[in-house]
Image (cartoon, rainbow, N blue to C red):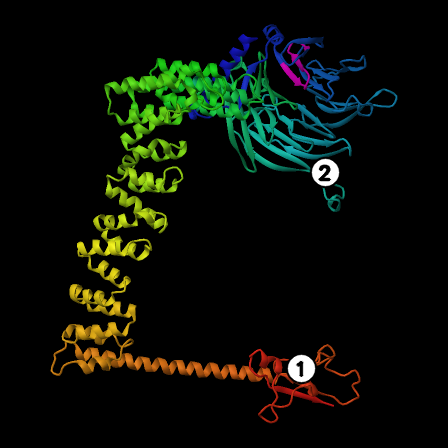
Amino acid sequence: MAEVEEQGRKQSEEFTDESEEEDSEEEPKLKYERLSNGVTEILQKDAASCMTVHDKFLALGTHFGKVFLLDIQGNVTQKFEISSVKINQISLDESGEHVGICSEDGKVQVFGLYTREGFHENFDCPIKVVALHPQFTRSNYKQFVTGGNKLLLYERNWLNRWKTSVLHEGEGSITNIQWRANLIAWANNVGVKIYDISTKQRITNVLRDNVSLRPDMYPCSLCWKDNTTLIVGWGTSIKICVVKERNPTEMRDLPSRYVEIVSAFETEFFISGLAPLADQLVTLYFVKENSDHMDEDFRARPRLDIIQPLPEGCEEISSDALTVRNFQDNECRDYRLEHSEGESLFYIISPKDIVVAKERDQDDHIDWLLEKKKYEEALMAAEISFKNIKRHDVQKIGMAYINHLVEKGDYDNAARKCQKVLGKNMELWENEVYRFKTIGQLKAISQYLPRGDLRLRPAIYEMILHEFLKTDYEGFATLIREWPGELYNNMAIVQAVTDHLKRDPTNRTLLTTLAELYTYDQRYDRALEIYLRLRHKDVYQLIHKHNLFSSIEDKIVLLMDFDKEKAVDMLLDNEDKLSTDRVVEELADRPELLHVYLHKLFKRDHHKGQKYHERQIVLYAEYDRPNLLPFLRDSTHCPLEKALEVCQQRNFVEETVFLLSRMGNCRRALQMIMEELEDVDKAIEFAKEQDDAELWEDLISYSIDKPPFITGLLNNIGTHVDPILLIHRIKEGMEIPNLRDSLVKILQDYNLQILLREGCKKILVADSLSLLQKMHRTQMKGVRVDEENICESCHATILPSDMAKPFSVVVFHCRHMFHKECLPSSGTIPGVQFCNICSAKRRGPGSGILEMKK
């Protein structure tokens, strides 16, 4: 059997030779295999004339009048000696329990395979075809038809006798019959007819197209796709006919059904058989020898095509040339195509050979991909259909893919695929690692090794690290950063790195990696020393992460030298672990660093480092004068005398002026501004800040003999001092620059003030009038008085219980109410009364708005 399968596989390659010439990348749709075992022996002595396929078995008829029942593998299960001449047709019902057989000598036999009942008849002419009712097993469907010169219908009546009726005659020999449900289709020399057995009406006649072809040499092929769709193939013509119900209004004397041809097209070769495949067609072609486009070797070789029917044509899906035995001697009538409806199996029958075509399954698809070296697609297909594949294993395909990539030299892709293919198989992983080592490609596989819960032996990881350490320091450092320290023996790797550092003691990559190894090993002090020595950016992260503040007390200067900002932020964020006093002590010999630390401390909290404020005066003066004045302004703990002394020693005028003004010596401060800085604008600004008339007087006195100063005063003092006082003191004849512009500005400022006052007055008047109108509207509103209100003086109900009696009530705008008799007598103004309550609370007297009398 294996030999036959191998032979079939070779034939499959031959079948697709032509297709591959056109497109070598197109995958075949079908696979082929010879039906062997008992069939091989039968066809050596005899020749196949017909065959019928059932889901459970096969029935083969031969030229020597024998019928063999075969299993699906071709083993003979039963043999019937029917005649001494050719068996023309075998028909089975749907159950496979009854068989009908006809032969060239006119014999017709219909019998049960498991019962004794049967029909045996000899006719005086050859019977070409026989067809059983699909439900022949059932008693009310004991019907079959035969075709010779006539189409005869046999029916068993209630007396258990066979009744014969002629359905058709007079159009030559009947060559094919196909029975489906209630419809019988047959072909004769003229065309194809369909008979509806339920209505006993013939419903169509599809004429033969090419009448020049001999019907006995190029017989008609019929095939039912379903209960209403008939496929007709004759010569080079294919028609697809659909049986439809006729509209009752159109019937009259017409049959209740009619046939519509939905597709008709011509083919290149002669049709020997048809079979449906979903919405496509499988066609068996006989290739005539004089076809010019065929090569000498492929003439007369039958073809099996899959085509997609279209309304007026077809599209070829696949095409295979079949190398059947003795194909050179066969004619179109010698080939038949049978199919199994339960499975997609197609049987190509020729006198000396039977070939089975099957739809390719996922295993075949993977075989083809592997043959074409499309390993990635094969692996993907296997992963998607891993439950359905039988002959392939996903991991084996993956290993073949890896081997292919290694052979190509694509080591990186091969290593990447190891992750996907090897999965959790640690043994395979180790084998692959050693293979990559053998070919000198350990680096390629290093980044894909398992490093999670599933791990290899530590020796594997150490082997790779040693390999990198020999050739690639950067790659070694990357692996140390990426691999967890538990994967390998940390001490062994530390020793190896130390040995390399003896030869190259200043290598930054090795030193950094050694620090990381020390960190994994929790020897943080050693790691910290290396980071500080290298001024590595991770030093601060290491300190924070492992709380190494006690280890850096004596290394503060080193940290500050590396990165002042980060170091100071870290020290200030962890004052509870490193006190300010300790830091100041460490930085005592580096005043520039001490200043940076104390400056940031002061920015964070003006009071925390107050005892160092006196020291900071000198530090600011020495290293950061721009921030000295802000410091003096913000600090409340800075000794002013010390600060004044330092500023005077260094001749810091602005700072000295600020300190003098803060100590109350404003006149001296103003004098310094005028004499040292000679900046009239600053002097004016200073005078404005102090808002002291004596300072303004001193400023005017100092400026009166200095024309530029007078100009500055005229331009700026208009809102603080009356400019007339300054103008009166200017000496007659003194030349003052830009005097006219200054006087114009004074006048403009004065006009602006007048306009502002007028504008404010208008706004005030408008607001007052608006509020007065609002108050008037409010006071004009009525006030509700009912039984719930009380007199604010006697606290009795404001309205009497007897409303018939006269009463008098006074209601004020403040909503307080009194009985008139409860109010005190009118005040100084006759006729005007005031609310006692509001007057007592100093809310202003509320005048009465309503006096109710009755």
Give the side of residue 626 with respect to residue 778, left or right.
Answer: left
Quarter of the rendering containing residue 754 = bottom left
Residue toward you, 423 or 725: 725
Q: Secondary structure at mark 2?
A: strand
- Label 1 belongs to which residue? 817
Instruction: Give the residue type at disc 2.
Output: Arg
Residue 529 is situated, as x and y percent measured from the top left of the image, at 30, 28
**Tag of residue 606:** none
Along the viewing direction, whichever of 382 and 506 lies nearer the viewer: 506
Instruction: Give the x, y percent position of residue 384.
Output: 53, 26
Question: Callout 1 environment at 10 Å: few (<14), some (14 to 19), or many (20+)?
Answer: many
Q: Is residue 377 visible?
A: yes
Q: Which residue is mark 2?
A: 257
Q: Nearer the viewer, residue 386 or 111?
A: 386
Magenta segment: 49-67
Left or right: where does residue 132 sit relative to residue 659? right
Is 115 a magenta residue?
Answer: no
The residue carrying pointer 2 sits among few (fewer than 14), some (14 to 19) or many (20 or more) residues within 10 Å by Cα, namely: some
Q: CA distance from mark 2 to mark 1?
A: 107 Å
For residue 574, side relative to residue 250 (left or right): left
